[in-house]
Amino acid sequence: MRGLGYHQRPRKLSAQKAKMERDWPLFSFERLTGSLVRWTGKMRGFQKWYLIAVYWDSEGPERPYVVLLDPPLRPREGRTFEQIPHLMFNSNEPELSALCLFDPEGREWSNKLLIANTTMRWVAEWLMYYELWHFDGIWRGGGVGPESIAEARAATVHRETGQLAKDAT
Amino acid sequence: LLADDMADLIKALAEARQSEFTDMVAILSDLFGERVSNKTVENFMKRVDQRSGRQPLRAERGTGAIVPAPAVAAPAVARASVEVPRHNFHCEDDSKD
């Protein structure tokens, strides 16, 4: 992807940690079990400050997982968690669903990139659009595919019902 | 009396500055009336919609606060912010696993 400093090899944890310390001084680092690490700290959305956690397996190819801690993720008044845009939806604990910040098929993130330069800035953008979405229900940040899990599930049901009707005739 | 009113105003504006957008609009409506706050929000949303997807956003270094487009023209603000790399938001359903 143009404009991003791709490295030849996966970035080492030390490089990720150093860049996070430099660019995001409000975040603190913690080593969890094995190669799993976590940065916790505050980031400002459109107006409000959010306490967030970034989980990352420093030895695997997996993307970082970002969850809102305080205030926690919440749907719009009278609506459901499934309707919140752009999540990696966690059915068991919806309030702990991670933010879905990029299209995996678009190869927009890899562990050759720095979390401080990519994931963290995308979170800042997500938070701004999330706050505006809470106000009027319009997601202004764009994206690919369905906007929410509710939309994705509705599309699946629609497709399956259509197929059943087709098979029946 | 005026001093008290001004103190209340400052307190309410400070609260608005730390609130979520929805709560901020409610505070502004209390202070200046619904007509004024609605018009302001409408103009703001129009600007966000016009800008949406046209150019990369910039986030303030350290805090992540998104910098308003007109402010980026100032060199000091541009230096204190970083570009948000282009990307596409997405969504994934764990019940498909």
Image (spheres, helix red, strand yellow):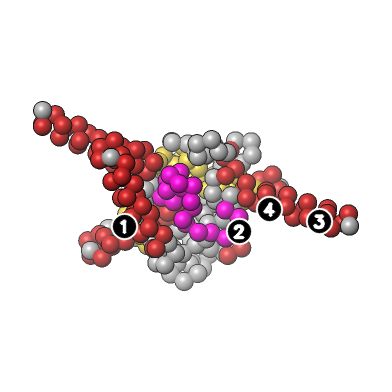
Side of A91 relative to A33 (left or right) = right
Q: Residue at x 49, y 52 (%)?
A: A139
Give the distance between the C-alpha atoms of the residues marked 4 and 2, in whole angstroms. 11 Å
Q: Residues within 10 Å of mark 3 (few under 14, many from 20)?
A: few
Q: Residues within 10 Å of mark 4 (few under 14, many from 20)?
A: few
Side of B10 relative to B94 (left or right) = left
| Residue at mark 4 shares a chain with residue at mark 2 | yes
Q: Residues within 10 Å of mark 2 (few under 14, many from 20)?
A: some
Q: Position of residue A144 (x, y in %)?
A: 57, 60
Q: Position of residue A19 (x, y in %)?
A: 39, 55
Q: Earlier in the sequence, mark 4 or mark 2?
A: 2
Tag 3 and tag 4, C-beta contact below 8 Å? no
Give the distance between the C-alpha atoms of the residues marked 1 and 4, in whole angstroms. 36 Å
Name the amino acid, label 2: Gly
Give the distance between the C-alpha atoms of the residues marked 1 and 2, in whole angstroms. 28 Å
Name the amino acid, label 3: Gln
User: What is the chain identity of the residue bearing mark 3?
Assistant: A
Name the residue that disc number 1 marks: B68
